[in-house]
Image (spheres, helix red, strand yellow):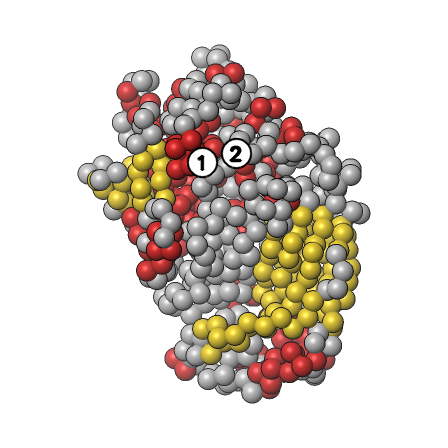
Amino acid sequence: MTTFTRRNAWNNNGTFDNSDLLWYAKAVHVMQSLPVNHPNSWWFYAAIHGEFLLNPIPPPPPLPDYTYLNWVNISYISPTAQLNTLPSQNLITLFWNQCQHGTWYFLPWHRGYLVAIENILRDIIVNQLNGPADWALPYWNYLNKSENKIPPAFTAQFLPDNTPNPLLVPQRYGLRVDVGNRENEANDECQWDTIFSEDSTPAQPGPGDIYGYYYGGGETEFSHDPNSPETGDLEQNPHNFVHGMVGGQNNKKMLGLMGVPDTAALDPVFYLHHANIDRMWTAWNVTGENENSTESSWLAGPSSQGNSLFAMPLDAAGTPWYYSPEDVINTRELKYSGSIYSYSYDDLSLTSYDKTPPKKVRENILGRLNKLGVIGTLKDIKMPKITNSELVGASSDLLKLSEGEVNTTVLLDTNAWKPVSKSFLKASVNDIPDEIFIQLEGVKGGGDANFLSIYVNQKFVKSISLFGLLAASIKNGIHGDAGLTFKINITNIIDDLQLENNVVDLNSLDIRIKAKNPIPDGDEIRIGRIGIYRVEKKS
């Protein structure tokens, strides 16, 4: 059995001297020559991830004019797409708008998506272009700071034979990824997580939920919904960050295709970005020796809740390959269309930027207890599970970032905070203190390429990407105008506040939220509510 090797797009300086990129460009051109109703066309595969074709953005108001993102208005989509000739309703229902976000299915769904298009591209390369039979999808490791710029093959006007370059996308406004651990920077701190999801057993003591909702995301059903608050650490950063940075916005504050979920997969760099995310997951398993979830509801996928298995079209007839997360756990023994498919990466380093765990990430449960004066060892601690979650404070008014920043004070309910104080005072290896989360609810607007930085009592907490904001804000849209929700662990900051002030009964928290980029004229970022939650955990 052949094991295909996915290689670095920056080999041979990221130009078309890298044959993986040259064959990719040629095969993309073939897929783009097919109409949108062909299940193996570039446009059909982009619609699997999401589309603004059947579900276009309405004209203003209430949102400013984002109709330039409707597929019929995108110049990159060639006339050969024949957007007025749609697939059958059966094919649309089975395949389109299926991407999984804000869920523990994010990683396995996208792995199957990459495997499916990789096989279509290879079939074109071998059987139509007489190319190499061992071709595999390359990846772009933007977290290597020497390779954080988009490979030159994606910005060249022409292929070596002087034909137009299909990898060049006019509506791509970001040319680099800002890498670091400061505000609004992409990094791979998530690779130091050791817990895939809430009920996973970690292979080793680690930070778990310090930054987001575990490595792989929260437990959900089928989730083609950016409103889910259970976005995993890998999905939030670097995944969402890179989408926003590479899509970017131009000097007219217009968004690029990669920055919006329903246009992102039109850009060929999308698949190299996701190959890198898949590489990081593989490294997390193989090099980091971390385990995925063993819960039956994750292994079986949405079918465990009565929904269909994930599906990808294999051929011109739209023959589906159905798969579950369990089918794609192991890249060397992946169950693909009735056979075993095998691939790996030429680099499975656990991290590319964050070579050692940052201080905040090292503060796992034992570190937190030691900070609170509790004496114990790792073997004394049993991994706790959530037993109760309760709202302990919330903002009272709608918050608007029309000028790029907003400040508010969230009052904490005295009675609701008492259990937090008690858990803090009686902290021990058998009584883990409550964890505290801040949740931004009903976040709306149109700035998918923007980022928000959150501060609590003048302490920087985290930056978040607004990838998915527009689709979640469209009235009567498929996402129900619910906005985005972000759930962020602020336990370390609450611990520090209580220790610094020698007080356990906090009355309020000062919240500051600021946007990275200017907000388009006539638009604003709105936050429906800021909630503060206590999460009780017991061993």
Please give the residue where the numbered disc 2 appears in the rendered image: 51
Q: Residue at x 41, y 82 (%)?
A: 380
Is tag 2's residue or tag 1's residue first in the polypeptide sequence?
2
Q: Position of residue 531 (x, y in %)?
A: 66, 65
Q: Position of residue 481 (x, y in %)?
A: 62, 46
Task: Look at the image and tell me in which quarter the N terminus lies.
Answer: top left
- Say if residue 492 shows up in the picture: no
Please give the residue where the numbered disc 1 appears in the rendered image: 96
Q: Is residue 391 left or right of residue 123?
A: right
* Label 2 crowd (10 A; few <14 / some 14-19 / many >=20): many
Q: Determine the secondary structure under disc 2.
A: loop
The residue positioned farthest toward the top in the image shown? 162
Identified by mark 2, the residue type is Glu
In this rendered view, identify the residue nearer to me: 522 or 430: 522
Q: Residue at x 68, y 62 (%)?
A: 530
Q: Is residue 234 left or right of residue 116?
A: right
In contact (CB < 8 Å): disc 2 and disc 1: yes
Circle on res. 488:
none
Q: CA distance from mark 2 to mark 1?
A: 8 Å
| Count of numbered marks | 2
Quarter-wise, where is residue 169 in the image? Answer: top right
The residue positioned farthest toward the left in the image shown? 1
Q: Residue at x 67, y 41 (%)?
A: 446
Position of 389 relative to 254 (above/below): below
In this rendered view, identify the residue nearer to me: 97 or 196: 97
Q: Position of residue 345 (x, y in %)?
A: 35, 42
Position of 161 relative to 441 (above/below): above
Q: Is residue 57 left or right of residue 306?
A: right
Q: Position of residue 73 (x, y in %)?
A: 61, 24
Identified by mark 1, the residue type is Trp
